[in-house]
């Protein structure tokens, strides 16, 4: 029944603990109450039966056994025992009289076969023990009783002796009826305990539903909030602690939504400012670049005192132009407007073209098969390769080794330099924007955006770049891209 009641339900540890606690409390209370009730009823039933039988036996001993002659015959003993056994409580009687010559005369009657051997020795000694009479004790002999279980059946055995030389009498009463009544009571209490456990399970289920349902709603709301649904709120009902918790959650979610909205607005404003600034700077930079190129062509004819300044202006103008281009590229990534223009690319030819365009042929060693063709964005691959190889040449030194391989459905391009490697504390940050490890890379004069832009271009392809130190020294940057980007991220592809 319980299995059918709770079948298909999703049990959490809190729900299970709640059920166990309720069950343990109910079990403890039910067992304690049942045990106390059973013990009290048992004592009441046995005491009532015992008192009735012993009281009647005492009265019969006084009325009948005491009326026997001083030296009764076997017939007289037997007739008296039969009269005593016929009384209402229903017990067996054994009368014993010891004659002067030492012989014993018996009289026995009743439903149970009852002999002197059935009377415990300790009870016989107690019954025949003659006591001194005092002010507090006016009788030489007293009645004693004991409960026994011969052959597993419960019996009450009692005995006393007539004062003044009369016979000794024993009664033998079966307690089977009382045992049956007590067994029935025990079964009833066991059933009541089982019903209490079932009731506790139902109560625990009701309590769990009442207590845990709001907690589950709170957990679902927190999960949705973590997934970005900042406008989600809980319905507040009641005035208890759970209602206060839901109200607090709503206030927290509202404050978080406002803060995220403010941060998003500021971020959007900053991104727009960078984009606008970069765009506005392109026009004057174009003019400056043109002037710088003219000055660079005429530098040999200039005054030797002016030539270094002209060279500095030319190099810084180019650097500023690269920075603006990088900022605009970063802005496109942040705005989510960057798209891929896919084409079938011979990777070896693409790497060779990248190296040749930047006059790096003498400083770069290429290891690439001629038949490797991947479908990707050639312009963005060129940006990635230029940044990785340029970074290796600038910070690691030549020769730089570029290897191209295919692993499963991935294109793997590894760029290894001949430098001292990257310090361990720098490795986690090499792809961070504007990060410069100036202490380990004193020659670094870039913007700190090159590797970050390379990583963004790898991500938009559905790939990744890792940086590590090679076993033989030098840094190793490994680019991994899908062989067919269109199958991986078709939504970001422009035909």
Image (tube, helix red, strand yellow):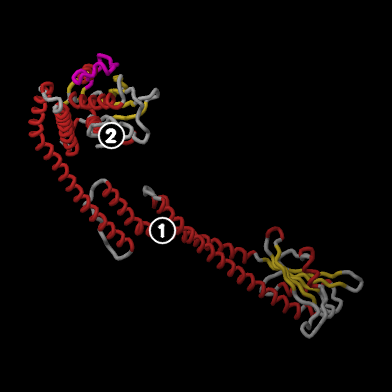
Q: Which is more toward the observer, 360 or 81? A: 360
Q: Residue at x 70, y 58 (%)?
A: 151
Q: Assign a secondary structure to mark 1.
A: helix
Q: Residue at x 72, y 75 (%)?
A: 57
Q: Which residue is mark 1?
A: 204
Q: Which is more toward the observer, 163 or 371? A: 371
Q: Which residue is mark 2?
A: 431
Q: Assign a secondary structure to mark 2.
A: loop
The residue lying furthest to the right in this view is: 101
Q: In this rendering, does residue 270 appear at all?
A: yes
Q: Is residue 53 above or below residue 348?
A: below
Q: Is residue 183 above or below residue 491?
A: below
Q: Residue at x 16, y 42 (%)?
A: 271
Q: Is residue 489 above or below residue 240?
A: above
Residue 43 lies, in percent from the top left, at: 62, 70
| Displayed quadrant of residue 59 | bottom right
């Amino acid at each position: 029944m319980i299995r059918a009641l709770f079948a298909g339900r999703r049990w959490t540890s809190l729900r299970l603990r709640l059920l166990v606690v309720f069950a343990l409390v109910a079990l403890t209370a039910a067992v304690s109450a049942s045990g106390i009730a059973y013990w009290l009823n048992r004592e009441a039933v046995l005491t009532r039966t015992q008192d009735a039988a012993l009281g009647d036996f005492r009265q019969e001993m006084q009325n009948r056994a005491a009326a026997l002659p001083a030296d009764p015959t076997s017939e007289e003993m037997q007739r008296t025992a039969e009269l005593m056994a016929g009384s209402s409580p229903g017990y067996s009687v054994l009368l014993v009289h010891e004659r002067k010559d030492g012989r014993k005369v018996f009289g026995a009657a009743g439903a149970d076969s009852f002999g002197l051997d059935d009377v415990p020795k300790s009870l016989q000694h107690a019954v025949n023990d003659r006591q001194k009479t005092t002010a507090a004790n006016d009788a030489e002999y007293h009645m004693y009783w004991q409960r026994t279980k011969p052959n597993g059946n419960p019996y009450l055995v009692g005995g006393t002796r007539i004062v003044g030389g009369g016979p000794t009498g024993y009664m033998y009463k079966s307690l089977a009826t009382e045992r049956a009544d007590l067994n029935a009571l025990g079964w009833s209490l066991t059933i009541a305990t089982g019903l209490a456990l079932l009731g506790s399970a139902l109560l625990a289920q009701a309590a769990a539903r009442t207590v845990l349902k709001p907690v589950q709603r709170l957990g679902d709301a927190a999960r949705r909030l973590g997934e970005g649904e900042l406008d989600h709120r809980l319905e507040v009902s009641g005035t208890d602690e759970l209602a206060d918790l839901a109200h607090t959650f709503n206030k927290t979610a509202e404050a978080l939504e406002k803060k995220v909205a403010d941060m998003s607005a500021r971020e959007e404003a900053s991104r727009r400012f960078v984009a606008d600034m970069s765009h506005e700077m392109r026009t004057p930079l174009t003019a400056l670049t043109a002037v710088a190129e003219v000055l660079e062509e005429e530098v040999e004819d200039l005054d030797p005192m002016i030539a270094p300044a002209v060279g500095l202006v030319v190099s810084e103008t180019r650097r500023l132009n690269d920075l603006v281009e990088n900022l605009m590229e970063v802005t496109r990534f942040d705005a989510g407007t960057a798209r891929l223009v896919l084409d079938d690319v011979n990777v070896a030819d693409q790497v060779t073209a990248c190296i040749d365009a930047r006059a790096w042929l003498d400083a770069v060693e290429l290891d690439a098969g001629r038949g490797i063709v991947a479908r990707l964005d050639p312009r963005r691959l060129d940006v990635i390769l230029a940044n990785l190889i340029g970074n290796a040449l600038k910070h690691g030194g030549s020769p730089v080794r570029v290897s191209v391989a295919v692993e499963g459905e991935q294109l793997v391009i590894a760029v290894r330099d001949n430098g001292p490697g990257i310090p361990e504390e720098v490795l986690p940050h090499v792809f961070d924007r504007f990060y410069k490890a100036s202490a380990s890379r004193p020659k670094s004069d870039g913007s700190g955006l090159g590797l970050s832009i390379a990583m963004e271009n790898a991500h938009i392809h559905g790939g990744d770049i890792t940086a590590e130190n090679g076993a033989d020294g030098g840094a190793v940057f490994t680019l991994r891209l899908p062989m067919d980007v269109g199958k991986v991220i078709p939504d970001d592809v422009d035909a």
